[in-house]
Every structure is written in structure tokens, then in C-alpha cells.
Amino acid sequence: MPLLLQPPEPNNSGLESLLWALTKNKEWFEKMIIKNSAVLLRGYDVKNAQDFNGIIEAFGWDDIRYVGPAPRTHVYKRVWTANEGPLSEFIYYHHEMVLIKESPEKVVLFCEVPPPEGGQTPFVPSFKVTERMLEEHPEAVDEMEERGLKYSFTAPSNSDTSSMRGRGWEDAFATSDRAEAEKRAKALGMDMEWLPNGGVKTILGPRSLTRVFDGRKGRRMWFNTLVGMYGKEHSAAMMADGTEIPKNVVKRCEEIIEEESIQFKWEKGDVLFLDNMALLHGRRPSLPPRKVLVATCK
Ligand SMILES: [Fe+2]
């Protein structure tokens, strides 16, 4: 993993012929993403956001608008920066938009500038986390599954790029009107509590611990963000009825995720397609410069 696709001959790496081939093999390509969980295009002449956008549009997959804590900047049409937060910080493993009612099926990343050191995008087969947690903590898994999970998250009013979770609610909901933000939050399945400093506490739940998606061999995916949000400065995770989750269970889960992690090292021009239903992904701390762009698709 990932499935590697390269130009047939080194002198046949042009964008035009790539776009032609992708358009011709759309269905096959989509099957390969699901079968392999990740597909990598390497060695093609993909130079910038416009070229990357051309690839996304060749497939014709619907766009899905990002909702989440990462501060992002729009670059071009379907293309956004992956995260404006500090490169020195580790972005913890997650399924993209895992808490939102409709999460993207595909997360597509493009490397414009590979980092000189660090900055890998690690990913983890989600079903393996479920399998190992069931082996080691079957009762806790059953209990969390039965009761469901609840999360809370605090967001400032305006985006703060000094934090990788600093996306402000005005930016996240594309409005500065509180009533409108509440309405949009409700539609995504979130409740809001306003804070005296202008920020907001969002509450999400109940949410499931694991999920099974069509076409993924019946595998039970660890489709939650328990480790990422548990006991943090801006967030919390508990069972949906308010019951605390034992710390040792979360700690062990964190170790398992790290143990199952596959390191992906970027090369210039790489385009990586991730099956967001099957893989957790993150970002290792990196030396600058590093420029990875993203498009999220249905
Ligand atoms: Fe992500």
C-alpha cells in the first residue's frame, strides 16, 4: 500500500495523457481506491493547484465542503491548503470529517513542495484498530458501542493559524451571524453553547464507535475520534450518557494506532488518493517548506 501508478515510459508523463487515461478508466480507478485503500500517482507532470484541480475534475466526483477544526485556505476551484497550522506540530490521525453526517469518501492530496525533513503523511488501516481493540479491551469496546460516544469542542470566533485546531466558527460556518451558525451547525448534527469570549462550544453526539461501509469487505472501521479529542485542552470525549471512558483504554488505543501506522514520504508531484472510509491519516511534524494541497470528494 498504496497502489503505485507511474507513467508507462518516462517520456510519457504529460498531464494531458494522464487526464485522458483517468477519464477513460474512471470506474476502474475508483475500484482500485476501495480495493487498495490508497492509490498513488507518481512521476507525472503535475506541477500546481491548477493541474491538480484538472485531475479532480477529470473524475467528476462531487465536492464536499470541509467542516472541521483545521484552518484552511482556498487555493483554486476544488483545491485547498491541507492545514495552515504550524508545521512543527503533529496532526493526529483522523478520518476526514468523521463527526459530520456526510464525510467525504475520498481525500486526495497533492504534493507541490515536499518537505526537506519529516512531514510524512502516515496512515492506518482503520479495521486493524478495531480488531486489536476487540482483542485487548472487548468489554470497553462493547460498552462504548452500545452507549455511543459524545464529543465537545471549543472553537474561537476567528481563525487562529497559530493552532492547527484554530479554525474559528465564523470561518467554519461561513457566517458571522450566530443564529445562522446555529442553524448550519444543527444541519450537521451539532449543538452549540456560546462562550463569553465570543467563541463557541460545540457538542456532538451520540456518535458510533465503529462503522461498516459498503464494499469494504464487511470490515468494522474505527470510525471515531476518541483518541484525538479525549482529555485535550479544547476538546473532550465521553460516552453519550456522560459516562467517563477509562484512561487506560484510550491510552492503549493510541499505542495501537501508532503501531499500525504506515509512513508515507512525499515526492514532488505526488497525487495520493485515500479511501477515507478505510484509512485514518495524519501529518508528521516537518521542517519548512512543505506544501501539500487537498480536495475532498464524495
Ligand atoms: Fe485530514
Image (tube, helix red, strand yellow):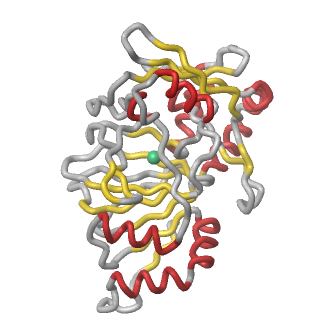
Q: Judge from the rendering whether residue 70 lies leftward or rightward of residue 244; answer left or right.
A: left
Q: Is residue 4 above or below residue 279?
A: below
For image coordinates 33% across by 78% down, the residue present is 43
Residue 265, given in percent of the width and then of the height, sits at 35, 60
For image coordinates 59% across by 20% down, the residue present is 247
> Which of 45 and 238 lies nearest the eye of the viewer?
45
For image coordinates 34% across by 56% down, the residue present is 293
Q: Judge from the rendering whether residue 137 lies leftward or rightward of residue 41; answer left or right.
A: right
Residue 60, given in percent of the width and then of the height, sits at 53, 70
Q: Is residue 249 above or below residue 298?
A: above
> Which of 180 and 188 lies nearest the eye of the viewer?
180
> Which of 43 and 79 lies nearest the eye of the viewer?
79
> Which of 149 and 154 lies nearest the eye of the viewer?
154
Residue 35, given in percent of the width and then of the height, sits at 64, 68
Q: Quadrant of the C terminus?
A: bottom right
Q: Is residue 235 visible?
A: no
Q: Judge from the rendering whether residue 81 lies leftward or rightward of residue 173; answer left or right.
A: left
Residue 248, given in percent of the width and then of the height, sits at 60, 23
Q: How many marks?
A: 0
For image coordinates 61% across by 26% down, the residue present is 204
Q: Judge from the rendering whether residue 187 lies leftward or rightward of residue 219; answer left or right.
A: left
Q: Is residue 249 visible?
A: yes
